Image: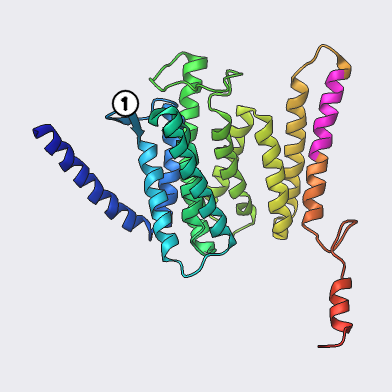
Amino acid sequence: MTTVFVLGLILLVAGVLGVLLVDWLIKRPDVVAGLVLGSVIVQAVFVDRVPSLILPGDTRVAATDVVSALVFAAGVARLLRLRRFDRYHRWLVLLALVLFVSVIRGVAAFGPQASINDFRQYLFFAGVALYFATFPPSDLLYDRIGRIWLVMTIPMMILVCLRWLAIFAGIDLGVPAEKYGADAAIRVIDGPYTFFLAGAFVLTIPAWRHGERASWIRWMSVVLLLFVLVLNRRTVLLAILVGVAVVGLRDRRLGRPAIALVALGGVLTIGFGCLFGAESALVQGVMVAALAGLIGVLVYLTVELDHPFAGRVRATPVGFQQILTSPSR
């Protein structure tokens, strides 16, 4: 009887705290961004041993699950306050309903533990997308989130350095090793976390405009690029190349720095491809040529899509001219 009373009291306190946190998070998108990005760091550090609470029925609730549930609840609360839904809100609501039905069917077919384990990653994505879709576009908000992202890359880079120390210097400080994708000793974090660093680097590209950003952002840009290059994931390098091209075309004030970054990224990506030797020189040449061609095609498509009224595939003024010349009804 005492155990049931204590459990009920704990659940009541947790429920009250959860409601208060949700009410606070509704108004603080910067805090939500920090929690989401911090959850990525926690997942990268602990891999599959994230601090968790074991509930009855052997159900494990990790700290990242609490964050995703709070963000999802705050997103639903903000969605209910909207006066009207646009098409993106409707698609997100449909996605949430599909996920809810899938987890119910999964619990019935495979049990709660297996279903909840698979449902975690989808709840995290759906909650974050639903929450931030309820906010109008704001340069100030985006700038604050970008700065939080940059700050969160610091512990990620520290994690990389600690794992390098454990592998190359034999200094093990108790940091868990990565679990997936350990196909090279230098790649001490999985691909998604390398994309985490690469995304932050792309955010720093506008800082190369003279006198428009803080100098620490430019320094962070250089350090992030070095880490991404050393981690040596070609897909990430290719994504950076396209990201630099898009930002450079959108912001013409970047000028030569953007062109130089695109050229440097292309050379480095192709250079890493040359390091992976093949038994046949013909196969090696075809692989490098295909990679170079893919980079060229992506840059070309980026340029073409940024100029919708020029080039071979373009929107012509014929429709507008017909509207102007046709008699009014």
Whether residue 40 is visible, yes or no, is no
The 10 Å Cα crowd at callout 1, few under 14, some 14 to 19, many 20 or more, is: few
Q: Quickly name the residue at label 1.
A: 58
| Horizontal side of residue 69 vs 312, given as left or right | left
Is-magenta flag for residue 130?
no
* Residue 305 horizontal/vertical position (percent): 78, 55
Q: What residue lies at 50% left-to-right and 33% top-to-bottom?
A: 157
Quarter of the figure with residue 223: top right
Given residues 165 and 85, the one toward you in this image is 85
Most extreme residue toward the top, as rendered?
Answer: 279
Q: Is residue 213 above or below residue 59?
A: below
Given residues 226 and 140, the one toward you in this image is 140
| Horizontal side of residue 170 vs 260, given as left or right | left
Q: What residue lies at 42% left-to-right and 56% top-to-bottom?
A: 76
**Chain part drawn in magenta:** 283-295
Q: How many labels does the image show?
A: 1
